[in-house]
Amino acid sequence: MVRNYAELHDPNAEYTMRDLSAETMGCRAERGPGPRNLEITDVQTTMIDGNFPWTLVRVYTDAGENPLDIDRLFEHLVQKMSGEGSIGGVTVTAISGIEIALHDLAGKVLEVPAYQLLGGKYRDQVRVYCDCHAGDEKNPESNADEAERVVEELGYDALKFDLDVPSGHEKDRANRHLRNPEIEHKVDIVEAVTERVGDRADVAFDCHWTFSAGSAKRLARALEDYDVWWLEDPVPPENHDVQANVTRPTCRRLAGCARPGRSRTSRTPTTPRSPCTTSPRPWRRWPPRTSGPPSRTRWPSSTTATSSAGGRTSWRRT
């Protein structure tokens, strides 16, 4: 029997997916005199070619839902798409794109910057980093040359390079284990880039969730002598305990996870030391280690430790 797919429905949706539309919620579109009386007529997307394909969302008015009801519309979309995994993956990414467009539209309607609707601003300028790609990315000097170009010609003072690039020493790309020559190759890239830019820029390195916990710990320890802003996503994001395990033994700043939709476990308040960080810059090793095996950071006598809530230790100059 052939059925029109439009006639199919999920019977559970009638009670498991809350309908928060203006009609069912009894929200009137009219908001009194002025520009707030508008409704959504269409939502469209377009893709542009950036450092990777970027999807832009455009919201049109005037009929349907009032675009100023941003929280309700966001929750409405989450509920209606719950069967497609609305709180993870590409679905929540699409919903978030619509939410951002609605904030932008609200700012235009009310004739204020969108940030003013989100609590105001802290600063007039926001620092950004340049995600750098050198072409011959496995060549340390090629990466260093690109760092020099971005700093000198483009004026950036914050950069990020990839460390999960082929080294030529891999035996099995499907295996997350790093052999010693592979780690040495990644250290060569970090050394070339950080020494080239010196104090002119902060440099982070991205691993794109590639390595095993043991390999990630060995890599982080091998990089402790270098001025790395942060080491990003060294292990897959699914297991937060593994991320914490990788973080504990190193003084190197680790960052993750850029893809929370892949995570299948939740972090509890008692889990020690989150692998994610938003601190602006790690302390450099002082004095620099010139020989001998890797060791923990040695702090100068002018640096003291203070303990914060939860038993974590922070460092400051005195």
Image: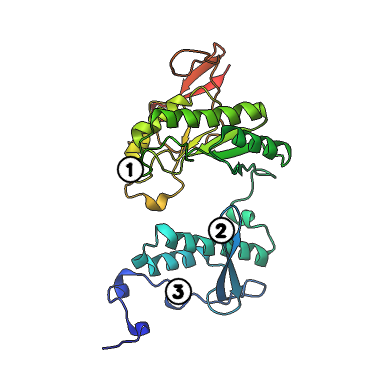
Tell me: residue 194, above or below residue 164. Answer: above
Q: Is residue 10 visible?
A: yes
Residue at the right extreme, as displayed: 153
Mark sitting on residue 144: none
| C-alpha distance separating marks 3 and 2 | 32 Å
* SS label for mark 1: loop
Residue 143 horizontal/vertical position (percent): 60, 36
Please report whichever mark, 3 or 1, sits nearer to the chain's N-terminal start: 3
Residue plotted at (53% across, 78% down): 64
Q: Which marked residue is nearer to the observer: mark 2 or mark 1? A: 2
Dot 2 amino acid type: Pro
Q: How is the image coloured?
A: rainbow
Q: Are marks 3 and 2 in contact (CB under 8 Å)?
A: no
Mark 2 packing: few (<14 Cα in 10 Å), some, or many (20+)? few
Mark 2: which secondary structure?
A: strand
From the image, state whether disc 3 or disc 1 is nearer to you.
1
Could you tell which of marks 2 and 1 lies nearer the N-terminus?
2
Packing grade of label 3 (10 A; few <14, some 14-19, many >=20) is some
* Numbered mark located on residue 53 in the image: 2
> Would you say the residues marked 3 and 1 are in contact, meaning their CB atoms lie under 8 Å apart?
no
Badge 3 element:
loop
Q: Amino acid at mark 1?
A: Asn
Which residue position holds label 1? 239
User: What residue lies at 55% left-to-right and 22% top-to-bottom?
Assistant: 284
Residue holding disc 3:
21
Residue 61, x across and y down, in percent: 61, 75
Residue type at mark 3? Ser
Relative horizontal placement of residue 267, taking residue 92 as reference (left or right): left
Q: Residue furthest left?
A: 1
Q: Measured along the vertical axis of the image, is residue 237 above or below residue 14?
A: above
Quadrant location of residue 104?
Answer: bottom right
**Residue 245 appears in the rendering:** no
